[in-house]
Amino acid sequence: CPQLPVPRSVSPAAMMIDRQQANKLLVQLQKRPSRTAVCKGTGFEAAPMGWATAVATTRFSTTSTNLEPSPAMKAAQETRELAFAHGYSDFEAWLTSGGDDRSHIKKTGANKYHIRPQPVAADAVFRGSCTGNPPTARGYAAAAELYKTKLELVKDDQAKLDAVLSEIYENQRSRLANVLDLPQGVEVIICPSGSDAEYIPLAIAKMLQPSKKIANGVSQLREIGAGSAPAAVGSYFSTHAPLLGKLPEGLKALNGFEGIDGQEITARNRDGSVVNAAAEMKNFADREIEAGNYPIVHGVFGGKTGLRDADMPGSRDGGDSGLGVVDACQGRFTLKELQSWLNQNSLVLFTSSKFYQAPPFCAAVLIPPTIADKLKSLAPPGPVSLFGQDGLGAFVTDKELSACLDSWKPLLRRSDANNIGLALRWEAGLAGMEALVATGTSDEERSAKITEWANTVTDMVKSESFLDPWCAERSIISIRLSKSGRNDGEWRSMSELGDVYRWMSADVSSAVPNATPAEKEALSKPAYIGQPVDVSETHAIVRIALGVESLLSYLKDKDATLTEDRAAVSKLAALGKHFDSLRKSDL
């Protein structure tokens, strides 16, 4: 119980407690005249006195007993073993840990996005920041330095690691607030991914209005991460969770998140036209309030194609009547836009693993001051199981939280749940963010350069008969591929572009013997782009996206950067022309 003098390493909610600590707790409970008074508000009011004994004989902290490793430790080791099998270093294996199945190294030696935990070759082109990033050379060096100086010596001592990670996350929250120029009072919660971040607004809603039914509206379905919609109603979205590992059979929803209603609004109609998601979200919120419920309303500021909803929702009555959530996980916004969302009390979901090119994945929830101040005086949401190993405890610990969620910390404290990989990925992302700030360029200057780049690359795409620049949204250019090389309405499908996406990252020149010398050169060059998106019943698209490193390059040497873009476009055009030959090659 939080009322008892429980050491930092004890978490009653997660049952992570050693035998000596449990026995002391049992003695204290037996001495108290009223178990209900001692445990008020914890969920253990009606528990039999033997519960502490049961706790004492469950899983033990490896720090004090050297017995069974915790689920978080097992999950990290199992993920790292997948990387070790392909010859990756200890540091590189840690980079892949602390996430879900999307980060696992597969038989190909890469993850599902064809990404390795190493920088791409110097002669390769990378324009896939809208999907997922290998570590940049800058980010890799920054994360490796953090590992060497702070983490390597304590990684096998969970108690020391717990303390070191607490300091690291505090430092990273402070640096993130600095580079984003966050207003005073905005608080930062660190999360393993943008999809995982969806659980935080749900738990906050349960704090603000514990007696009301929660309904969560999500927009841009099919153009946001596939995990966002299930996470928005409290469901698991992967086969694995960061601090739990492989999910037990039949586990569908997080404990404590049952009974949340959801509303899903697609990004586009099946003809590819844009849905007015902002209007539909407003109607959804009005209906839920009229029904006496508590709505959470999303606005997406840049989905997979860069599409932005017309309005970003604010929180109603400072969060008393409803929460507004801005999904800005692509990171393609100006600081002025970010501050406008915080000024209207929107919670903002952000990642440094898209535009800012951290490895997959790392995220944050930005909580505006008005709501942060309210949370400081409120009790944590119930039931206690919400914070357990099958609830939020599968994703975050107390170390990732800021002061406004101090009430959660005793329920999430586990010295043997330490997400080294998440800290390394955030360090890599912050390296890119800080490098961009160091250029001294303003929001306006960056926006102008991004527009200039997008216009130039769009013209490159237009010059290729097998390519069509279907849409361009800020730093993301969405491209469809013609089957014939003529604008006759015959376009490549989602499954066909899945092959194109895979071929782009490899040398496939040997599979096309009848290609011209120029085409062979283009086909030989690895060029990483954004994965396909199903945008219409007639076609799908792939994407070329500017990331922080290519923007830095463009600011320094525009011609050299555009030479890389030309290489990516030329290869994409050659794949469009020789698609049938490549399909027959079984590459």
Image (spheres, grey):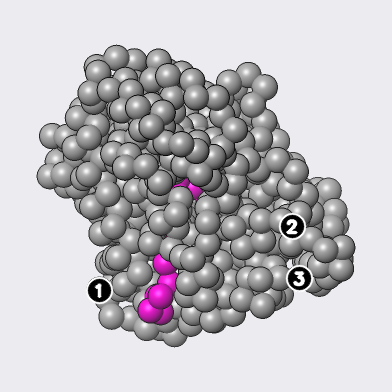
Q: Viewed as shown, does residue 560 lie left or right of 347?
A: left
Using the image, tell me which numbered label, if any, was put on residue 438: 1
Q: Foreground residue, 109 or 467?
A: 109
Q: How many numbered badges does the structure rendering display?
A: 3
Answer above or below: position of 362 versus 584.
below
- Name the amino acid type tagged 3: Ala
Residue position for label 3: 278
Q: Does residue 569 show up? A: no
Q: Foreground residue, 570 or 426?
A: 426
Residue position for label 2: 212
Crowdedness of circle 1 by 10 Å Cα count: few (<14), some, many (20+)? few
Q: Secondary structure at mark 1?
A: helix
- Name the amino acid type tagged 2: Lys
Answer above or below: position of 30 versus 65.
below
Q: Position of residue 151 (x, y in %)?
A: 19, 40
Asked if the residue at tag 1 contacts the one at tag 2, i.e. Cβ–Cβ closer than 8 Å, the answer is no
Give, as a single range, the part of the protein colored magenta.
182-194
Q: Is residue 472 magenta?
A: no
Asked if the residue at tag 3 contacts the one at tag 2, i.e. Cβ–Cβ closer than 8 Å, the answer is no
